[in-house]
Image (cartoon, rainbow, N blue to C red):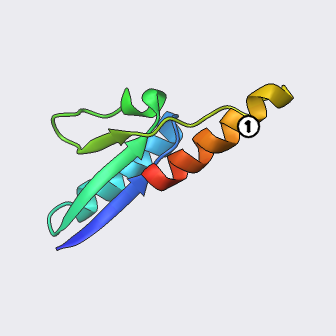
Amino acid sequence: MVKILISSGGTGGHVIPAQVLYDYLVDKNDIIITSDNRGLNYLDKNVYKTKKIDVPKITKNILDFVPFVIFFILSIIKS
């Protein structure tokens, strides 16, 4: 059994292909789909193993940039 992570954007155009891929591979693999809050709204949590990944927004304010970079790196590590 192989562990597979499917990472999806937050729109239906990203989540629907992730669902199809999940359904195709789930019989012989351990799969989880990651997305943000928007994307998880498209998924039935009783059918799909999911995990929420918060994605920070890029900001123009220099004071917000340092926390953004830290949060972004932590998001990468978490995924």
Give the structural element (helix, strand or loop) at label 1.
Answer: helix
Q: Please tell me which residue lies in front, 55 or 39.
A: 55
Q: Is residue 17 shown to the viewer in this render? A: yes
Q: Please tell me which residue lies in front, 73 or 21.
A: 73
Left-right relation of 3 to 16: left
Q: Look at 56% across and 37% down and name the residue there.
A: 55
Q: Amino acid at mark 1?
A: Val
Please tell me how crowded label 1 is: few (under 14), some (14-19), or many (20+) other residues with Cα within 10 Å: few
Report x, y in % for residue 64. 75, 28
Left-right relation of 2 to 37: left
Report x, y in % for residue 7. 45, 52
Q: Looking at the figure, which quarter contains the N terminus?
A: bottom left
Residue 69 figure quarter = top right
Report x, y in % for residue 79. 44, 52
Q: Please tell me which residue lies in front, 74 or 6.
A: 74
Report x, y in % for residue 19. 34, 48
Left-right relation of 69 to 18: right
Q: Is residue 19 shown to the viewer in this render? A: no
Q: Look at 47% across and 27% down and name the residue there.
A: 38
Q: Which residue is mark 1?
A: 66
